[in-house]
Image (cartoon, rainbow, N blue to C red):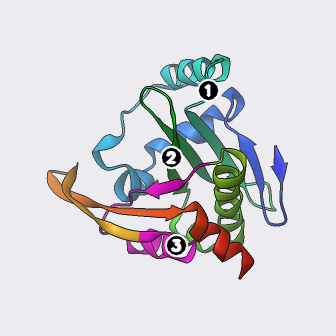
Amino acid sequence: METLRHCTIEVLEKKQLGFWWELKNGAYAKRNYWGNVLRVYSKRELEKEIEKQLKSKDARKEYHYLVKNKRKEYIGYIGINRHFWAEPSQNAGINVIPRKAQHLRSKALSEAVDWTLAKCFLGLRLHTVCAGPLEFNEPFIRFLEKKGFQRQGVQRRITQIDGKFYGRVVMDILDREWRKLQVE
């Protein structure tokens, strides 16, 4: 657990399973973040997946964090997914899923993303961190841009929601760009 000025960051464990399941299956997150990439797990399947990840002795591929505000309420999830093929690479994807739309404007979630980017670039020594928000999720795109992410393009018609196809905006930030923002 990491306690910062505006939030507390917890590593996802079995004890937070209820919140994680609720967040993954909530209408807001499904509509604005997951698209058709969400596989609906039962709580038991999700618990087994978490147990497997916690026992893994290999280089970690995924890092899952839950964010609490000062009132000790869970306000969102942040995940780091390192890209592994034959060996650990120097880039990763980041997922930021707020519990509610207004949490994107909270100091707590903003601070948690700053902490996560520092973990990526300083702790994991990554070169690039990318994100793939749905093209219609402008509030999240603006949030990422404030963190230094740049739009690289759009993967068109990649996600289906309620029978309609949507694209994902390809966004990333390089280590040197992030470091420059830290100095300013």
Q: Position of residue 99 (x, y in %)?
A: 56, 56
User: Mark 1 Cα within 10 Å, few/some/many (few <14, many 20+)?
Assistant: few
**Residue at coordinates 45% horizontally, 62% vertically from top-left?**
172
Q: Amino acid at mark 2?
A: Ala
Q: CA distance from mark 2 to mark 3?
A: 18 Å
Q: CA distance from mark 2 to mark 1?
A: 13 Å
Q: Position of residue 36 (x, y in %)?
A: 28, 44
Residue occupied by mark 3: 143
Lower sequence index among marks 2 and 3: 2
Judging from the image, what secondary structure is the residue with disc 3 in?
helix
Magenta stretch encompasses residue 144: yes
Residue occupied by mark 1: 59
**Residue at coordinates 24% horizontally, 60% vertically from top-left?**
167
Q: Amino acid at mark 3?
A: Phe
Horizontal placement of 124 versus 81: left or right? right
Boundaries of the magenta span: 126-150
Label annotation for residue 92: 2
Instruction: Answer yes or no: is residue 137 visible.
Output: no
Q: Are marks 2 and 3 in contact (CB under 8 Å)?
A: no
Magenta stretch encompasses residue 5: no
User: Mark 3 Cα within 10 Å, few/some/many (few <14, many 20+)?
Assistant: some
**Residue at coordinates 65% horizontally, 76% vertically from top-left?**
181
Taking depth in this image into account, of 167 and 16 the one nearest to the observer is 167
User: Mark 2 Cα within 10 Å, few/some/many (few <14, many 20+)?
Assistant: many
Is 161 drawn above or below residue 58 in the view shown? below
Horizontal placement of 118 versus 91: left or right? right
Residue positioned most to the bottom: 184
Q: Quadrant of the N terminus?
A: top right
Judging from the image, what secondary structure is the residue with disc 2 in?
strand
